[in-house]
């Protein structure tokens, strides 16, 4: 900034002395430095004017306004800019998930059927409903089968059946609930084979184990395929894409059933 003489007045760049005569006296009271642009002025805060853009680059200096390059919208599957009504398969993966037909309904029937059966069986054993043996008879049957700690196992087995059945009906923690039911059913088959003379395995009823084996197959199927969408687990991974977790739950159910037999009974059912 340069200083002016005592009798001189500040003027804008390019103005003549005559222009100062037309300026109101109040304008002279403004600090001249407030009206001067800074050396690094780029037009972004001191005025609303936008410097002109020179696409040739002849006037390009540091701080010039350079707009972003314009990108033409690309039309393609799954991209923004697809015309309304265009024949696009952008949602094809999502439509494929919806093409399940009656699969979820079938899984619901399978899951609820096994769950209701387990709940009814547990209530029959614990409370003697529907002609059941009741708590005392159930404890005696567990002890006669060779299990240790029959008093605790009575409540654990009956309560476990009811809990697993309710979870299956609700579709909640379905792989774990089906794995628990699988462990119980495996023990039922082993106890039935051990109680036969000589440990003979009979398949067909009335003395066979076809009913328990069918329930085992149903429990394994539910562990592997998941609960379907009609359940509280409908948005979880094991409902939409069961894989590793379901395999682990299946192994847990089988190992749990065998471990219960080995550590709480210890008898060889085929001996």
Image (cartoon, rainbow, N blue to C red):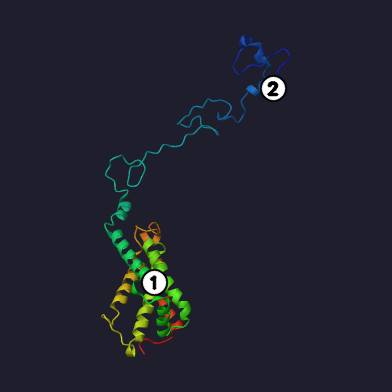
Residue at 59 percent of width and 29 percent of height: 41
Helix, strand or loop for disc 2? loop
Q: Which mark is residue 47?
A: none
Helix, strand or loop for disc 1? helix
The percent coordinates of residue 31 (x first, y second) are 68, 20
Between 8 and 216, which is closer to the camera in this rendering? Answer: 216
From the image, tell me which residue sits under label 2: 2
The percent coordinates of residue 243 (x first, y second) are 37, 65
Between 177 and 43, which is closer to the camera in this rendering? Answer: 177
The percent coordinates of residue 204 (x first, y second) are 25, 80
From the image, tell me which residue sits under label 1: 122
Q: Is residue 79 above or below residue 150?
A: above
Q: Is residue 244 visible?
A: no
Q: Is residue 99 above or below residue 15?
A: below
Between 129 and 270, which is closer to the camera in this rendering? Answer: 129
Residue at 32 percent of width and 73 percent of height: 215
Between 29 and 109, which is closer to the camera in this rendering? Answer: 109
Q: Is residue 124 visible?
A: yes
**Cα distance in 3D space between marks 2 and 1:** 100 Å
Q: Specify few, some or many for label 1: CA neighbours under 10 Å numbering under 14, 14-19, or 20 or more.
A: many
The percent coordinates of residue 61 (x first, y second) are 54, 32
Residue at 35 percent of width and 66 percent of height: 116
Q: Quadrant of the N terminus?
A: top right
In terms of image quadrants, where is residue 120? bottom left
Q: Quadrant of the C terminus?
A: bottom left
In terms of image quadrants, where is residue 45? top right
How many circles with numbers are drawn on the protein?
A: 2
**Badge nearest the viewer, 2 or 1:** 1
Q: Specify few, some or many for label 2: CA neighbours under 10 Å numbering under 14, 14-19, or 20 or more.
A: few
Asked whether disc 2 touches disc 1, contact meaning CB atoms under 8 Å apart, the reply is: no
């Amino acid at each position: 900034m340069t200083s002016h003489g005592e009798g001189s007045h500040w003027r804008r760049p390019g103005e003549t002395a005559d222009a100062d005569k037309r300026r109101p006296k109040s304008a002279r009271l403004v600090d001249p430095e407030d009206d001067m642009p800074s050396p690094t002025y780029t037009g972004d805060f001191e005025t609303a004017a936008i410097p002109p853009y020179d696409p040739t680059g002849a006037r390009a200096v540091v701080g010039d306004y350079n707009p972003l390059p314009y990108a033409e919208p690309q039309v393609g599957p799954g991209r923004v800019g697809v015309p309304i009504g265009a024949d696009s398969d952008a949602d094809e993966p999502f439509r494929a998930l919806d093409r399940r037909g009656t699969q979820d309904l079938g899984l619901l029937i399978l899951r609820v059927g096994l769950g209701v059966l387990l709940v009814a069986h547990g209530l029959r054993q614990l409370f003697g409903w529907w002609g059941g043996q009741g708590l005392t008879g159930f404890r005696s049957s567990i002890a006669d089968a060779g299990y240790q700690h029959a008093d605790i196992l009575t409540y654990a087995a009956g309560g476990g059946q009811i809990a697993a059945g309710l979870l299956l009906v609700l579709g909640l923690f379905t792989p774990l609930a089906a794995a628990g039911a699988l462990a119980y059913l495996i023990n039922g088959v082993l106890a039935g084979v051990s109680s036969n003379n000589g440990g003979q395995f009979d398949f067909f009823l009335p003395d066979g184990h076809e009913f328990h084996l069918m329930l085992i197959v149903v429990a394994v199927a539910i562990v592997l395929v998941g609960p379907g969408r009609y359940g509280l687990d409908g948005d979880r991974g094991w409902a939409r894409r069961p894989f590793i977790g379901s395999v682990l739950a299946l192994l847990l159910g089988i190992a749990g059933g065998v471990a219960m037999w080995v550590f709480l009974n210890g008898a060889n059912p085929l001996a």
